[in-house]
Image (cartoon, rainbow, N blue to C red):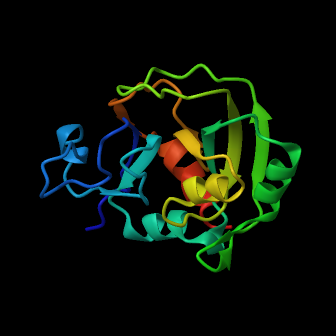
Amino acid sequence: MLKPCVVIAFYKPYGVLSAFTDMAGRPTLKDYIQVPDVYPVGRLDLDSEGLLLLSNDGDLIHRLTHPRHHVAKTYLVQVEGIITPEAVAALQRGVIIKGRRTRRCQVVVIPEPALPPREKPVTPHGPTSWLRIVLFEGMKRQIRHMTAAVGFPTLRLVRIAVGPINLEGLLPGQWRFLSPLEVARLQEASRR
């Protein structure tokens, strides 16, 4: 008998590993989510925070993470310094990371967003800028490498959406099951 597709939206806090176990004893998903047979849809690194989806549907996980399906992932990113229009244009065109050019992406400079405070606050040593970045691929630590490549290292990174699903109504450490309609919208977004 087929199990129904389960998808969880989790606001991963800073400092939590995007896995259920860790030999080093760091905080993991298991400390927050005790739902059996769900797995992370991609990952957010230890220093990043925000929306992490989990599901029991391996096909959906694959479609949401494979760049061929063009599922948008939206991030709010704080960088060191006052970012220049040239750096924004370079990010939009794609930058070279480890010998490979990143795909075109959407990058917009935004005012400082209203976000929950981070457990370990960012302590900048000068002015900072905030960006809204929409990626359609997901290499390891991609945004951090991209902003560093144009001379504006990342200080804080918060994923706010995956396709049509966002963080609305969640605070760090909270999670919720997606409704059947939200799951259907997510599945549709992953079939493009």
Q: Where does residue 63 sit, x and y in percent of width and height?
A: 53, 68
* Horizontal side of residue 72 vs 42, given as left or right: right
Q: Residue furthest front?
A: 125
Q: How many marks?
A: 0
* Horizontal side of residue 151 vs 19, given as left or right: right
Q: Quadrant of residue 15?
A: top left
Q: Where does residue 75 sit, x and y in percent of width and height?
A: 61, 43
Q: Residue at x 76, y 65 (%)?
A: 94
Q: Is residue 109 above or below residue 92?
A: above
Q: Residue at x 47, y 41 (%)?
A: 51
Q: Quadrant of the N terminus?
A: bottom left
Q: Where does residue 128 sit, x and y in percent of width and height?
A: 66, 30
Q: Report the front residue among 35 and 102.
A: 102
Can the viewer see residue 72 in this picture? no
Q: Quadrant of residue 164?
A: top right
Q: Is residue 183 above or below residue 68?
A: above
Q: Residue at x 63, y 27 (%)?
A: 126
Q: Report the front residue among 30 and 125.
A: 125
Q: Quadrant of the C terminus?
A: bottom right
Q: Residue furthest bottom?
A: 99
Can the viewer see residue 149 in this picture? yes
Q: Is residue 127 above or below residue 83?
A: above
Q: Where does residue 50 sit, x and y in percent of width and height?
A: 47, 38
Q: Quadrant of residue 104?
A: bottom right
